[in-house]
Amino acid sequence: MTTPAAPRAILFDLDGTLADTAPDLAAAVNLLRSTRGLEPTAYEILRPTASAGARGMIGASFGLTPDDDGYLALRDEFFSNYEAAIAVHSRLFDGIPELLAGIEAAGLQWGVVTNKSKRFTDPLLPQIGLGHAACAISGDTTAHAKPHPAPLLEAASRLKLAPEQCWYVGDDLRDIQAGKAANMLTIACSWGYCGATSPESWQADYLFQQPAELLALIQAALAGDALAA
């Protein structure tokens, strides 16, 4: 495959891409169950839905959708549970610290574009080692959340870059849809949660199994640009 033009910035989804936040999300929804005298939902059931936040967790654990009676009350209680214990078990995925260090060493910027609301993004990032992101766009930063391109376009604007100078990395179909709509090169990461569909079907520009593969592509793109100069 042809090496792409070098980026000026790498933008990342958060949950399932940079950080494994599923354990704390699962704990928040299982606290809902325990306070109601219910057995916990198995983590293996909850983890694949983590990128969908409250909707995914409550759907998997209680079988409710946002249109169902009782969903909103559960959601608000879930939010309170999660906010109170937001970074107990959440950690960066293996290889992410090295990837971010490599991006910075190459003189590039990196940022976060997540559908998580600002209420959770802002306190979480510094607690898991991401407080130095060049930008952090949450699901409620713009009028639309992903798969709409607005959050990605806002990130590019804050970095003072054209969208096509940015790459977007995510573990959900919505991430790839948003990146394509924003005219960014898209990378699907199979180390994340990936949801109900296989990342091979998302038509991302690249699909990687490990963060090191992304760093290698960045370095190859930079080297290619340097040779062409």
Image (spheres, rainbow, N blue to C red):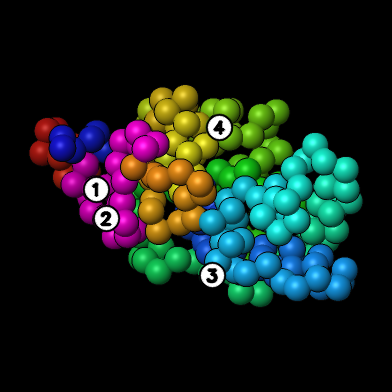
User: Regarding mark 1 in the picture, which secondary structure is present there?
Assistant: helix
Residue 208 in magenta stretch: yes
Q: Are marks 2 and 3 in contact (CB under 8 Å)?
A: no
Q: Do the residues labelled 1 and 2 touch (CB within 8 Å)?
A: yes
Picture residue at 47% right of the left edge, 26% below the top: 182
Tag nearer the camera, 4 or 3: 4
User: Regarding mark 3 in the picture, which secondary structure is present there?
Assistant: strand
| Residue 76, placed above or below residue 67 | below
Inter-mark Cα distance, 4 to 3: 25 Å
**Mark 3 neighbour density, 10 Å: few (under 14) some (14–19) many (20 or more):** some
What is the span of residues highlighted in magenta in the rendered image?
201-221
Picture residue at 59% right of the left edge, 45% below the top: 114
Q: Specify the amino acid type for callout 2.
A: Glu
Inter-mark Cα distance, 4 to 2: 25 Å
Q: Specify the amino acid type for callout 4.
A: Pro
Which disc is residue 217 wearing? 1
Inter-mark Cα distance, 1 to 2: 6 Å
User: Regarding mark 2 in the picture, which secondary structure is present there?
Assistant: helix
Which residue is label 3 attached to? 91
Q: Name which of mark 4 and mark 1 comes first in the sequence.
A: 4
User: Residue 192 location, x and y as percent?
Assistant: 45, 56
Picture residue at 23% right of the left edge, 35% below the top: 4
Q: Name which of mark 4 and mark 3 comes first in the sequence.
A: 3
Inter-mark Cα distance, 2 to 3: 20 Å
| Residue 219, placed above or below residue 30 | above
Inter-mark Cα distance, 1 to 3: 24 Å
Which residue is label 4 attached to? 147
Which residue is label 2 attached to? 213
Picture residue at 88% right of the left edge, 48% below the top: 70
Quadrant including the C terminus:
top left
